[in-house]
Image: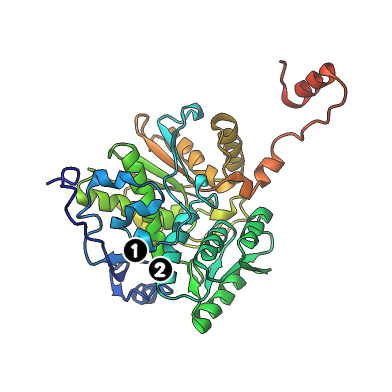
Amino acid sequence: MTPASRPANVRRVMPVPSALACVRCRARYPIDHYAQDCPACRAGGAPANLTVAYDAVPGADTDRGAVRLDRGSMWRWQDFLHARAADAVTLGEGNTPLLPAPSLGLGDVWIKDESRNPTWSFKDRLASGALTTARRFGAKVIASSSSGNAGAAAAAYAAKAGIPCVVFTFVGSAGPLVLQMRAYGAMVVKVADKADRWRLQTLGVREFGWYPTSPFFGPVVGSNPYGMEGYKTIAYEIAEAFDWQPPDWCVLPVCYGDALYGMWKGFEELKALGWIDRVPRFVAAEVSGSLVAAIEGGDALPPESPRNTPSIATSIGALQGTVQALDVLRKSNGAAVTIGDDDLRRWVLTLAAKEGLWPEASSAAPFAAIERLRGDGTIKPDERCVALLTAAGLKDPGPIEQAPPEPPLVSGGLRELMAALKNSYGFHG
């Protein structure tokens, strides 16, 4: 009996988290091990994150057609997740549009626009997944170290859950993002040295039992495992939108690879159920070159790859990739591409002018990656790509402030107006 034909009165079995499993060696740990990584892999020199393991196959008793009935949030996929929709901390995240982008000149490219989430970034899915478990575990304080999006999402969902939130950020973080954290009532703490964010958060987690939603120790392995389950729903939505015919490639801006791993896990689950016949290949668009170096060198742990200057893509500005990201690229026969600031600025402006979508700089990275991989033949001309647009440009408007001309000041009448349009924008009417 196929999922689509199963009678509606068949009782669906909700999966229950039974352990947290290492993404690399599959060693299993208790469900409250979320503030640690895999001790065995750390001892072996390749620290690895944990992922949620279930007592039953997620979605095994699900009617595929019934999932479509409730689009209130990503929790309509509760049969695949770690909690019931009724128990979720939700602001209506998920169900974001998948938009064709023919004007970009990149072939068959679609944009999964995560800027439509409640705090305008994909981090809302992570925050909903993480805060739902935090409330279940009786967390007293939420803690996040963030350059912006993750902290804003943690603050918003902590507010919804009624739990105090401390966000550690650094001097130089984008002003609108810090204001957003403060607006949701977070206790924002700035540090001069980025490393102090982790040191201080570690003290809160270890000494006071604060519940972490973000990485807070190094080498970084990734974020809260329960939060990362939320990213599986991006894969479910993409597969559903294409009538269960997945794209050939999914291209993401990658820092620590949380969404990369979550999406890959989601597609793997759908394939195991027979809902799709294959898993897309994945591309990590990064700014440091850490994953590129690991793939080329065959490394077990991506190396640290210092930059001469910070990238404008602060959301993916980490200098070292993760085992979980590298694992997905290898298992999916994917690729990693290093993107520079010039290409990021160009694609921010291109997306805004041609598709009416204003992304933050990090979100422009997938389009630069697709352009390069189409050019060298890695992505074939007839292959379909989905690019993940992770956050809105208003959160970090720096690239737009620096790139277009300053708007002209006009006084007088029509003649002066047309002269200003011509001189500033080359517009002739």
CB within 8 Å, label 2 to label 1: yes
Q: Going by the image, does 348 lie left or right of 3? A: right
Mark 2 burial class by Cα count in 10 Å: few <14, some 14-19, many 20+? many
Looking at the rendered structure, the kind of residue marked 1 is Ala
Query: Closer to the N terminus: mark 2 or mark 1?
Result: 1
Give the image location of residue 262, x and y in percent: 37, 56
Q: Judge whether 339 appears above or below 157 on screen.
A: above
Q: Nearer the viewer, residue 9 or 255?
A: 9
User: SS class of the residue under badge 1?
Assistant: loop
User: SS class of the residue under badge 2?
Assistant: helix
Applied colour scheme: rainbow
Residue extending furthest bottom?
Answer: 207
Q: Residue at x 16, y 53 (%)?
A: 10
How many circles with numbers are drawn on the protein?
2
Looking at the rendered structure, the kind of residue marked 2 is Thr
Q: Residue at x 68, y 55 (%)?
A: 175
Residue extending furthest front?
Answer: 9
Residue pointed to by mark 1: 83
Q: Nearer the viewer, residue 340 or 415?
A: 415
Q: Nearer the viewer, residue 416 or 173?
A: 416
Quick check: can you spot residue 214? Answer: no
Give the image location of residue 306, x and y in percent: 57, 59
Q: CA distance from mark 2 to mark 1?
A: 8 Å
Residue pointed to by mark 2: 133
* Quadrant in the picture for residue 159: bottom right
Q: Which mark is residue 63?
A: none
Give the image location of residue 204, x and y in percent: 55, 78
